[in-house]
Amino acid sequence: MARLVYCLNQSLDGYVDHMAFAPSPLLFRHFIEQARELTGSLYGRRMYEVMRYWDDESDEWNAEERDFAAAWRSQPKWVVSRSLESVGPNATLVADDIEAVVHGLKAEFAGEIEIAGPELAHSLTGLGLIDEYRIYVHPVVLGHGKPYFAGPRPPLHLVASELMGDDVIRLSYVPA
């Protein structure tokens, strides 16, 4: 049975904004390895549109960026959206009954399915479907943006913490 893991970078003041800070080379290497190990990813529309960047090769990419793109492209993706009419390669559009779809994914697959997108994670939290929350806390204060938790924070229990490089801490929580 697959586990659903909500995983994003976050500022010290609780915001997720992919344009405000980037992972260090060491942390980016961690994300490459993580992408290789994932069973798949479940995206909300906005986060999927951000990640589509990795669908097309760029001559400007370095070796690590090419590695991440290859890992990202190889995994199945499910995109929750009522406004999109189609999605890119290796992706499936999920327009209705997200709860049934997620239960089906958890039953059909093994390993970890990453959830990306605060609003989608909020919906899945309300349904009790997220198995773990991984927060990569960066030493940046943004003062604005989308919060990691798009609604009330669920009761959580810390199960692990790890220093990732010199300045990022990964916190892993499970529902209490």
Image (spheres, helix red, strand yellow):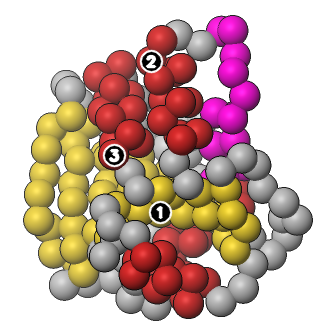
Q: Is residue 125 visible?
A: no
Q: Determine which quarter of the picture holds residue 46.
A: bottom right
Q: In the rendered structure, does residue 54 fall within the stretch colored magenta?
A: yes
Magenta-tinted stretch: 47-60
Calculate the distance from the C-alpha at mark 1 to the C-alpha at mark 2: 22 Å
CB atoms of marks 3 and 1 within 8 Å: no
The three-letter amino acid code for the residue at tag 2 is: Glu
x and y, in percent, of residue 111 in the image: 31, 62
Q: Determine which quarter of the picture holds residue 95.
A: bottom right
Q: Which residue is mark 3?
A: 37
Q: Indicate the secondary structure of the residue bearing disc 3.
A: helix
Any mark on residue 64, and which?
2
Q: Is residue 19 left or right of residue 75?
A: right
Quarter of the figure that contains the N terminus: bottom left
Q: Indicate the secondary structure of the residue bearing disc 1.
A: strand
Calculate the distance from the C-alpha at mark 2 to the C-alpha at mark 3: 16 Å
The three-letter amino acid code for the residue at tag 3 is: Glu
Calculate the distance from the C-alpha at mark 3 to the C-alpha at mark 1: 14 Å
Q: Determine which quarter of the picture holds residue 149.
A: bottom left
Foreground disc of the pair 2, 3: 3
What residue is rendered at 73% in x and 67% in y? 93
Foreground disc of the pair 3, 1: 3
Q: Is residue 160 left or right of residue 26?
A: left
> Where 72 falls versus 23 (above or below)?
below
